[in-house]
Image (cartoon, grey):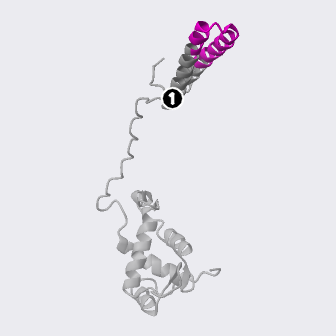
Amino acid sequence: MLDYPRDPAFSKILTELQNLLVRTNTAINQATQDNRYSDIALLADQAQGLQKIIQDVEAISGKCSIAQRPPAPPPVATPRPTRPRRGEITPQEAYRIPILKALVQMGGSGRTHRVIDHVRRLMDRTLQPKDFEEVGTTYREPRWRNATKWCRNTLKDERLLEGGSPHGTWEITEKGRNYLKGNGPDRPTILRGD
């Protein structure tokens, strides 16, 4: 068993108990010199009790030692995924038409999570395995979800999506509908229920 240094609290208690024992022994010597035999017996009992308490505290301190154990090894850092090479992930540009198409199919607007989930279904055959790796430092999410949100910002900057929609709602503009007509299917299917 390793012998670790004693906890400072136990050291302080033991020091006080030992000082009290020294004072008791001094009192026994004085009582002996003064021939106070009844005091000697009481003080001797007190000294034996203090010795027993000191032994008990020493035993407890050995069991409860919080001692300075060897430091724990540093946590092993999880390696960050390597940056994907060209062609390993779907380019952000590829999300443009699916986002616009999803919004038209949803009636022109939709809640963020529903639009993103619909984009996922539309891009099912396009997404690469690395698109499903988690990215982000604070809020971890699959790369394809993150790319969808970034593409949405680009579409908003280009005024293909509404910039003043309520928080959490994505909405296509007339310019976005025209862009989709020029770059996507002529008549997208409209889904009901959103």
SS for tag 1? helix
Q: Looking at numbered disc 1 in the image, what kind of residue is underneath it?
A: Lys
x then y, percent, for residue 12: 51, 29
Instruction: Identify the residue shown where x is 44% and y is 29%.
Output: 69
Query: In the shown orientation, is residue 99 left or right of residue 34?
Result: left
11, above or below 32, in the image: below
The magenta-colored residue range is 27-55
> In which quadrant of the rendered image does the C terminus lie?
bottom right
x then y, percent, for residue 144: 43, 65
Q: What predominant SS class does the magenta segment belong to?
A: helix
x then y, percent, for residue 19: 52, 22
- Looking at the rendering, which quadrant does residue 28 occupy? top right
Answer whether residue 62 is visible to the viewer in this image: no
x then y, percent, for residue 75: 40, 41
Instruction: Identify the residue shown where x is 45% and y is 23%.
Output: 4
- Which residue is labeled 1 in the image? 12
